């Protein structure tokens, strides 16, 4: 009687799931790109409403495929808003200084000082 060795079966469930996920992500990217392209062509053809719908659908599918990046941007968004508000405050104070300087210059040139 001979001894027969039975090879062990490797578990490939994770490999199959990763392959399925990559395939579905590829399809989402292809559909998103096609939607954006179709939307652009429709906009060029002066079909605004249909072009806008297709472009928004393509953008939504792109964001669906890039969820991690969108999440990162969402967490960084308040910092950007704070920076923009700070820049607006600086511009506003510069405009007030410029206005005061303009008024002083006008008074000096016309001789109507206080």
Image (cartoon, rainbow, N blue to C red):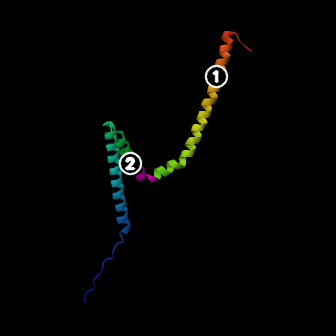
The one nearer the camera, 57 or 12, is: 57
Q: Which mark is residue 57?
A: 2
Task: Tell which tag, 2 or 1, sits nearer the viewer.
Answer: 2
Q: Quadrant of residue 77?
A: top right
Which residue is at 59% across, 41% downward?
Answer: 82
The one nearer the camera, 14 or 39, is: 39
Q: Residue furthest left?
A: 1
Which residue is at 32% across, 47% downward?
Answer: 34
Position of residue 13 measured from the top left corner of the image (x, y, whole percent): 37, 69
CA–CA distance in space, label 2 to label 1: 47 Å
The magenta span reads 60-67
**Does residue 100 sit above or below 80 in this rendering?**
above
Quadrant in which the N terminus is drawn: bottom left
Position of residue 18 measured from the top left corner of the image (x, y, whole percent): 37, 62
Q: Which mark is residue 99?
A: 1
Dominant secondary structure (helix, strand or loop) of the stretch shown in magenta = helix
How many C-alpha atoms fall within 10 Å of the one at disc 1: few (<14), some, or many (≥20)? few
Q: Earlier in the sequence, mark 2 or mark 1?
A: 2
Q: Secondary structure at mark 2?
A: helix
Q: Residue furthest right?
A: 114
Quadrant in which the C terminus is drawn: top right
Position of residue 35 measured from the top left corner of the image (x, y, whole percent): 34, 47
Say whether residue 105 is magenta.
no
Q: Quadrant of residue 98?
A: top right
Position of residue 56 measured from the top left corner of the image (x, y, whole percent): 40, 46
Which residue is at 34% across, 65% downward?
Answer: 16
The one nearer the camera, 23 or 111, is: 111
Residue 7 located left or right of residue 80: left
């Amino acid at each position: 009687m001979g001894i027969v060795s039975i090879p062990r079966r490797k578990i490939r469930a994770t490999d199959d799931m990763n392959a399925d996920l990559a395939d579905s992500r590829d399809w989402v990217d292809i559909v998103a790109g096609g939607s954006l392209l179709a939307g652009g062509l429709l906009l060029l053809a002066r079909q605004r409403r249909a072009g806008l719908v297709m472009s928004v659908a393509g953008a939504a599918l792109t964001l669906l495929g890039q969820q991690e990046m969108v999440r990162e941007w969402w967490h960084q968004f308040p910092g950007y808003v704070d920076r923009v508000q700070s820049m607006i405050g600086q511009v506003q104070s510069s405009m007030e200084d410029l206005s005061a300087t303009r008024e002083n210059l006008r008074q000096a040139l016309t001789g109507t000082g206080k």
